[in-house]
Image: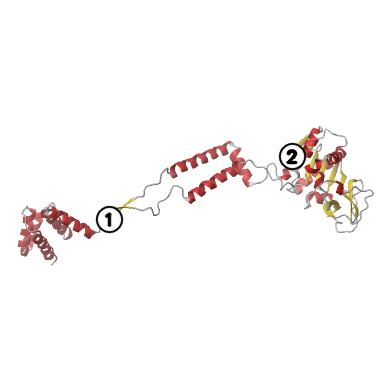
């Protein structure tokens, strides 16, 4: 008796686990293949790649239009830095290491130039120069004589950033730059006139340190006075050597080769022949899995056959033999069972010969054996009597 298995547990074509696996694979491939571009920290990163109001693309382009040789550096400051270069390091998001600071300042001592906006958190450059950026609030009543007013510069705002010595940040007196320094811009604060842009000499080189990012951002460079102010600082640094290249440090804004697992993996997979071959193999494997695993139609459920119990088989066989009057066949099978159970199955003797042997060994079975032999030889007798005779024969053997 056959029954069709219901739809319980039969897998569908688009199971949730399979769909989620496909989505995760697509997202991973997209993550690896989409070109990486560092963010500009919501417009606050002073990178020359950014044309947003908070970027410095305007300064880069203005210098290029004026005929300066402008470059971008995408590698860290390592040994052997060129000392015939003006380095532009503006509030780096990735702080230079102590070794990089050492190499950069050594290059400045050998004749290089440096335009620096130190990070607010300080770091190696600020520590080596002994200068930090600090917020300063203007006094309630200001005397601007001898000082430039910061409020006249777009983007600087009411709270200003000034340059102070790292050692006297908590004193009440305004910081005075070291001897030989040039103060380009000051502002009146509660302490008096405090510097915002200072020029320093270091060995055979020069350094300009600024306190406020507004001097360099696109929003201020768009104003002609802002661009002129930065050009004057660069002219002081170059000392008339306009052929000296200007190099914007972009490595410490997140560009170039960094120790990033995802970018290294993406570069290895996309920019090398073995990686591209691996991607093609992976894509082919995914297509093969999709072709093999997904079916255009819902699979048919498996057919289940309910098996009969042994007693049901006996009843079914008895009914079948009775229907065709196969009494001799039923008797022969029963005698074979007796031979198998009681050790009479060895040798080539047939059922009739086996029964005659039993009659010789047990004379009391003469009538029962004779009745069964008659059925096996084709005589039509009562089936019930044959069954009783076979039962008597097995009982006699057991006794």
Find the distance from the CA under tag 1 to the CA under tag 2: 80 Å
Furthest toward the right, the residue is 145
Indicate whether 157 appears above or below 56.
below
Residue 373 placement, left or right of 121: left
Q: Nearer the viewer, residue 243 or 383?
A: 383
Q: Secondary structure at mark 1?
A: loop
Image position of 168 with respect to 75: above or below: below
Q: Position of residue 148 (x, y in %)?
A: 90, 47
Q: Which residue is mark 1?
A: 307
Describe the colour scheme in one phrase.
secondary structure
When the figure is inspected, residue 98 is found, relative to residue 49, above or below; the finding is: below
Number of the front mark, 1 or 2: 1
Q: Residue 381: horizontal and vertical position, in percent?
A: 6, 57
Q: Residue shown at 65%/46% (left/top)?
A: 260
Question: Local crowd at mark 2 within 10 Å, few (<14), some, or many (≥20)?
Answer: some
Q: Quadrant of the C terminus?
A: bottom left
Residue 131, x across and y down, in percent: 84, 51
Disc 2 on helix, strand or loop? strand
Front residue (pair 70, 56):
56
The residue where tag 2 is placed is 73
Classed neighbour count for the residue bearing mark 1: other residues with Cα under 10 Å, few (<14), some (14–19), many (≥20): few
The spot of residue 89 in percent (x, y) is: 78, 44
Residue 81 seen by the camera: no
| Location of residue 276 (image quadrant) | top right
Of callouts 1 and 2, the N-terminal one = 2
Residue displayed at 58% across by 40% down: 269
Residue 59 sits in which quadrant? top right
Residue closest to the far bottom = 399
Q: Is residue 1 left or right of residue 20?
A: left
Q: Name which residue lies at 85% across and 51% down.
A: 162
* Left or right: 380 as drawn, with respect to 318: left
Asked whether the residues under the numbered discs 1 and 2 touch, taking CB atoms below 8 Å apart as contact, a structural biologist would say: no
């Amino acid at each position: 008796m056959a029954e069709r298995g219901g739809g319980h547990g039969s897998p569908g074509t688009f199971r949730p686990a399979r769909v989620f696996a496909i989505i995760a694979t697509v997202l991973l491939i997209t993550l690896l293949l989409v070109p990486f571009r560092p963010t500009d920290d919501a417009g606050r990163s002073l990178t020359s790649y950014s044309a947003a109001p908070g970027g410095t693309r305007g300064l880069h382009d203005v210098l290029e239009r004026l005929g300066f040789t402008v470059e971008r550096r995408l590698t860290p400051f390592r040994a052997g830095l060129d000392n015939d270069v003006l380095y532009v390091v503006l509030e780096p998001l990735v702080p230079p290491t102590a070794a990089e600071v050492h190499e950069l300042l050594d290059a400045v001592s050998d004749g290089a130039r440096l335009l620096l906006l130190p990070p607010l958190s300080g770091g190696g450059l600020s520590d080596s120069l002994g200068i930090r950026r600090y917020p300063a609030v203007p006094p309630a009543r200001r005397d601007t004589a001898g000082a430039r007013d910061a409020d006249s510069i777009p983007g600087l705002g009411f709270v200003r950033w000034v340059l102070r010595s790292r050692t006297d940040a908590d004193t009440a007196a305004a910081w005075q730059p070291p001897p030989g320094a040039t103060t380009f811009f000051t502002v009146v604060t509660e302490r008096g006139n405090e510097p915002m842009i200072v020029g320093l000499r270091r060995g055979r080189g020069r350094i300009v340190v600024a306190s406020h990012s507004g001097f360099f951002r696109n929003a201020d460079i768009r104003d002609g006075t802002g661009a002129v102010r930065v050009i004057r600082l660069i002219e002081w640094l170059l000392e008339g050597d306009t052929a000296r290249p200007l190099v914007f440090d972009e490595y410490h804004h997140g560009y170039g080769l960094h120790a990033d697992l995802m970018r290294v993996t993406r570069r290895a997979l996309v920019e090398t022949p073995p990686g591209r071959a691996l991607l093609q193999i992976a894509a082919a494997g995914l297509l093969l899995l999709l072709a093999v695993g997904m079916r255009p139609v819902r699979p048919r459920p498996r057919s289940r056959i309910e098996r009969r119990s042994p007693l049901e088989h006996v009843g079914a066989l008895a009914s079948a033999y009775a229907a065709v009057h196969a009494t001799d066949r039923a008797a022969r099978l029963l005698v074979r069972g007796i031979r198998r159970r009681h050790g009479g199955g060895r040798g080539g003797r047939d059922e009739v010969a086996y029964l005659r042997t039993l009659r010789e060994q047990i004379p009391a079975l003469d009538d029962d054996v004779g009745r069964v032999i008659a059925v096996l030889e084709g005589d039509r007798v009562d089936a019930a009597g044959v069954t009783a005779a076979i039962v008597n024969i097995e009982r006699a053997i057991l006794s």
